């Protein structure tokens, strides 16, 4: 008599091996998700700052980027003197909302000037940010990502303490 299939012992061994593999892989998968989330926020911030600078040059008018730090952080760009970046329709340039806000409380934002509310001003003539140069640090348990704005208005991102594809180390 021939039987096809697995015995109960073989199934139990297979399930136990699978559970061990899944258990050891979960922490690295969670770290991967956190790295991707931090990378996404850094790239969104880079795009928003670069777009704000470009609009300042194209429209020949000052564009202000408001930065509110802390756990409930947000960034918002406007041609007005200020805006509340926690409100979806308050930060607008050319009838286009320009804001990024904290999607999760696991990432905290701080700026190099230790202010709870800062403003980066892009000049309408050349897109410079004289007097507004700043370094914004997005901190997470896996590491710190930075958005660096210099006096000439150049914006770049870098990462500390974690390696992520596409982001250079600080």
Image (cartoon, helix red, strand yellow):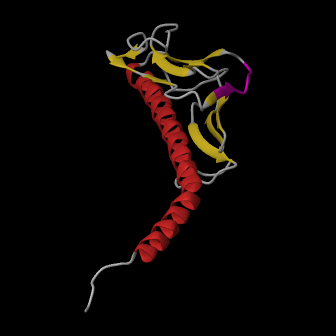
Give percent across and percent down for residue 34: 55, 44
- Going by the image, does 3 lie left or right of 114? left
Task: Confirm whether the magenta stretch covers residue 111.
Answer: yes
Q: Outermost residue toward the bottom?
A: 1
Q: How many labels does the image show?
A: 0
Does 19 sit above or below residue 81? Answer: below
Residue at x 46%, y 8% (from the top left corner): 80
Task: Look at 53% across and 43% down and name the residue there.
Answer: 39
| 150 vs 44, nearest the viewer | 44
Q: Looking at this view, is 20 or 151 the one in front?
A: 20
Residue 78: image location, x then y, percent: 45, 14
Which residue is found at the position 49% from the left and 19% from the top? 76
In the rendered image, the vertical position of residue 106 relative to residue 74, given as above or below: below
Question: For this rendering, which residue is in front, 164 or 48?
Answer: 164
Is residue 89 in sight in this rendering? yes
Residue 20, picture quadrant: bottom right
Task: Examine the rendered structure and indicate whether residue 17 appears above or below residue 124.
Answer: below
Q: Can residue 123 be seen in this view?
A: no
In the figure, 111 relative to 22: above or below? above
Report the quarter where the N terminus lies.
bottom left
Looking at the rendering, the stretch of residues picked out in magenta corresponds to: 109-114
Residue 95 forms part of the magenta stretch: no
Q: Which residue lies furthest to the front in this view?
A: 1
Q: Where does the image place residue 62, in percent across and percent down from the top left?
A: 49, 15
Residue at x-position 56% and y-position 47%: 35
Quarter of the image for residue 25 reads: bottom right
């Amino acid at each position: 008599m021939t039987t096809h299939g697995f015995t109960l012992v073989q199934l139990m061994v297979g399930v136990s091996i699978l559970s061990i593999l899944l258990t050891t892989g979960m922490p690295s998968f969670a770290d991967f998700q956190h790295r991707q989330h931090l990378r996404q926020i850094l790239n969104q911030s880079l795009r928003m700052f670069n777009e704000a600078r470009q609009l300042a040059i194209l429209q020949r008018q000052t564009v202000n980027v408001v930065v509110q730090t802390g756990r409930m952080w947000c960034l918002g760009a406007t041609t007005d003197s200020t805006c509340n970046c926690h409100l979806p329709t308050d930060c607008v340039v050319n009838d286009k909302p320009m804001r990024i806000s904290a999607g999760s409380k696991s990432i905290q934002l701080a700026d190099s000037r230790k202010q709870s509310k800062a403003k980066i001003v892009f000049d309408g003539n050349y897109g410079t940010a004289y007097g507004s140069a700043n370094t914004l640090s997005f901190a997470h348990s896996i590491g710190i990502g930075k958005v660096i704005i210099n006096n000439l208005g150049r914006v770049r991102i870098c990462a500390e303490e974690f390696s992520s594809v596409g982001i250079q180390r600080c």
